[in-house]
Each structure stands twice: as structure tokens, then as C-alpha cells.
Amino acid sequence: MNRNNLAYAVLMAQADGPDLLRARELAEAAFAAMPWEAGIEGTLGAALVETSAVEAGLRHLEAAGKQYDSPHSQASNLAWRAWGHHRLGQSEQAQALLGEAARLDGAHPGVQRIMQRCRAEQPCQTYTEQLSRSLVVRFTASAPLPGTAAAGWLRSSQRH
């Protein structure tokens, strides 16, 4: 349970980089030890969403959400699900989930933080898509001379 609590504290602190990866490791270890605990599965789901395993995170959050009975826990779960959908670029779904979270417990600090994050950040696709766009930009900057076979491949791949 301590691993889960540490992971959740890191998530609530909006850490990044290595701290988020450590939170994910802690959440995975906690879930491996106590997979029947909804709160632990919810923390794992949130950690997965934060570390760009969004689809897997949403599956864990949805499973955990079916077990919660308190409005406070349900609101937190809905907010994390909203953040996952926001990260996938599914703004309408994210807004609907955030609205439900706010209705259940709008004072919950996690709900408020995720609402702020959704307003502040444009929806992104997954980390993999961002990385591949970044690599195309870098590759384009060092593109081969026009008329070479590689230049033709580059032009055709940029059309997709």
C-alpha cells in the first residue's frame, strides 16, 4: 500500500521525467501485490496515462471506476480518465468526463488540477506520435540532396 501512496503523491505533485517513471514502477509493483484493490488499480491507470501508455491506463481506470462507491473516488477516477482522453485528442469525451467529475466532487484537488491542465494544454496525440513527428522534422532538416532516391522517399512519406 505504501508504494501506491507514494506513486499517487508523485502524480498529485505533477512531477515529470524520472519521477513519473518511478511513480509508474511503484504503481505497477503495488498492483502486482494487490490487484483486487480498486484504488491501487486507479493509481496504476493514472500513472500509465501520465507516462504515455494512455490506452492501457484508461483500461485500468475504467475497471477501477466500476468498483468505487464514494463520489470523491469516482470524481478522481473520472478526472484521470478525462486527462487520458484529452491526451488522445478526444476533447468532447474529456469534457463530458470532467463535467461529471466536477458534479460529483468539484472541490477535489485532483479534479481541479486536471481541469486546469486540460484548459492549459492543447490535446496531444501519444508520445510516440510526437516523437515520430520530431524525427521527421530532424530528418527533413538533414534531408538528402534533391533528385536522390532518399529525397523521393522523404517527399512521399511527408504526404501521409
Image (cartoon, rainbow, N blue to C red):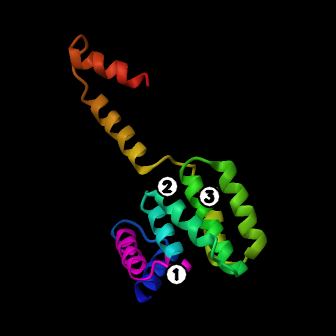
Q: Residues within 10 Å of mark 2 (few under 14, many from 20)?
A: some
Residue 29 within the segment the image draws in magenta: yes
Left or right: where 149 falls relative to 95: left
Which portion, as a residue range, is magenta? 19-40
Q: In front: 100, or 70?
A: 70
Q: Residues within 10 Å of mark 1 (few under 14, many from 20)?
A: some
Q: Amino acid at mark 1?
A: Glu
Among the two numbered marks 1 and 2 on one chain, the one whose residue lies closer to the N terminus: 1
**What residue is shown at x 39% (from left), y 71% (from top)?**
24
Nearer the observer: mark 3 or 1; the answer is 1
**What residue is shown at x 78% (from left), y 70% (from top)?**
103
Q: In front: 15, or 29?
A: 29
**What residue is shown at x 67% (from left), y 52% (from top)?**
93
Secondary element under disc 3, as helix, strand or loop, is helix
Q: Extreme right residue here? A: 103
Among the two numbered marks 2 and 3 on one chain, the one whose residue lies closer to the N terminus: 2
**Position of residue 29 measured from the top left corner of the image (x, y, whole percent):** 36, 78
Q: Extreme bottom residue here? A: 2
Q: Main secondary structure of the magenta part?
A: helix
Query: Where residue 55 is drawn, which disc sits there?
Result: 2
Residue matched to label 1: 37
**Alpha-carbon distance for marks 2 and 3?**
18 Å
Q: Extreme top residue here? A: 147
| Quadrant the C terminus occupies | top left
| Quadrant the N terminus occupies | bottom left
Residue matched to label 3: 118
